[in-house]
Amino acid sequence: MPLLPKTPSPSRRTLLRGLGGSAALGALGTLAGCGVPAAYVAPGDRAATDRSATERRLIWANWPLYIDTDDRHPSRRPTLEAFEKETGLSVDYIEEINDNDEFFGKISPSLMNHQPTDRDLIVISDWMCGRFVRLGWVQEMDRSRQPNVTKYLDPLLRSPAFDPGRKFTVPWQSGITGIAYNRHRLGREIRHVSDLWAADLKGRVTLLSGMDEAFALLMQGNGVDITDWKTDDFHRICDQVEKQVAKGQIRRFTGNDYIKDLSSGDVLACQAYSGDVIQLQADDPDIEFVVPEEGAELWAESLMIPDLARHKANAERLIDHYYRPEVAAELAAWVNYVCPVPAARDVLASSDDEETAALAEDPLIFPDAAMRERLAIARDISAGERTEFAKRWNGIVGV
């Protein structure tokens, strides 16, 4: 496949929201009130009759702007069209996921009542995937149909705490939550999380408002192993953030509008997503992204097959298509997130297009060895912890 360089809209990540709203808390509260065991689906009750052999199709729900398109024909999706041509399968691709909580609320009534969602494949953030896995709302994948996933999935992403061995989920794209800053305006480097609290940054720092997005990096600044953090670690972070708010160190808490603040110079340093910074650097090379020496959080949005999906085998085949290094490379050249297929790096490096080949050397798409040593996937927040933690965090943020 030809590898066409593509810089996606900087607004892509603005659609990937965290806990900010109350929809999911309300939904989980309802489940708890009715008794979570009643909503849980046992492994033997998750599968429907698979129609893949007779119905050569599947339905895939994804986020907007999260797949490669043809510059000349934006409605065309080259990697997906290649799959359809090769396999004879028809894919109904729906860009309907704008918020993790909103989508949870949209399909949870069907899943808790053991009804099909009319979707064979969905993509949501790993912390939300953890809820689906705990509730038994997703099916275990048949890896015999996915040799490319088995061979090429990045070892760093293979076994998150919420899904050991990745039995139920497969990363679609990945990213890093770290620190972005304007090197020219600040006049020095940032290397540690604690650097955010320096006197020359007073009132010029933002943190992410979503609890799931913000807490892990702050814990890492305290030397915490985020794969096994404890309740006291969370409350210690809250204590520290409260003090910084009281001192006026933190300008505000943001969604993805930190992009605007950093670009304008109103903010000099902030919590940020690696994919955003790649896009910002195209316009302002003075913007840097740093994985602090204490470490940073590696996250993913992952593919899952919900209960009672009618075309499970077809969905598994599609997932494996995107784990071919040449396909993963074409997708990475467009979306510019951390590629979950390290072997795609060599494909990009061999491109005749200089801009595309340069992506192979970008550590925010293919983290180098030194950076990889400092990346970790945080254990997720359990259902029992979430209400308590969200109440405290949202009280600080002002939600």
Image (cartoon, rainbow, N blue to C red):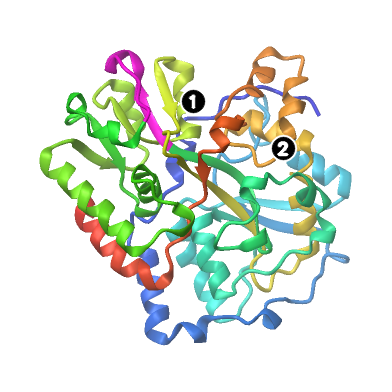
What residue is rendered at 76% in x and 44% in y?
152
Q: Is residue 186 magenta?
A: yes
**Quadrant assignment, res 71:** top right
Q: Earlier in the sequence, mark 1 or mark 2?
A: 1
Q: Is residue 176 left or right of residue 140?
A: left
Q: Is residue 50 left or right of residue 229?
A: right
**Residue 18, percent from left and from top:** 40, 52
**Residue 83, percent from left and from top:** 81, 44
Residue under circle 2? 328
Residue toward you, 87 or 372: 372
**Amino acid under label 1?**
Gln
Q: Answer yes or no: do the residues labelled 1 and 2 have beta carbons within 8 Å? A: no
**Quadrant assignment, res 308:** bottom right
Looking at the rendered structure, which numbered label has been put on residue 109? none
Q: Which residues are magenta?
A: 178-191
Q: Is residue 260 above or below residue 339?
A: above
Whether residue 367 is visible: no
Q: Is residue 330 above or below residue 111?
A: above
Q: Is residue 311 left or right of residue 114?
A: right
Q: Is residue 126 above or below residue 45?
A: above
Q: Residues within 10 Å of mark 1 (few under 14, many from 20)?
A: some
**Amino acid under label 2?**
Ala
What residue is rendered at 29% in x and 14% in y?
187
**Quadrant assignment, res 292:** top left
Looking at the rendered structure, which numbered label has been put on residue 279? 1
Q: Is residue 126 left or right of residue 118?
A: left
Q: Secondary structure at mark 1?
A: helix
Q: Secondary structure at mark 2?
A: helix
Whether residue 187 is visible: yes
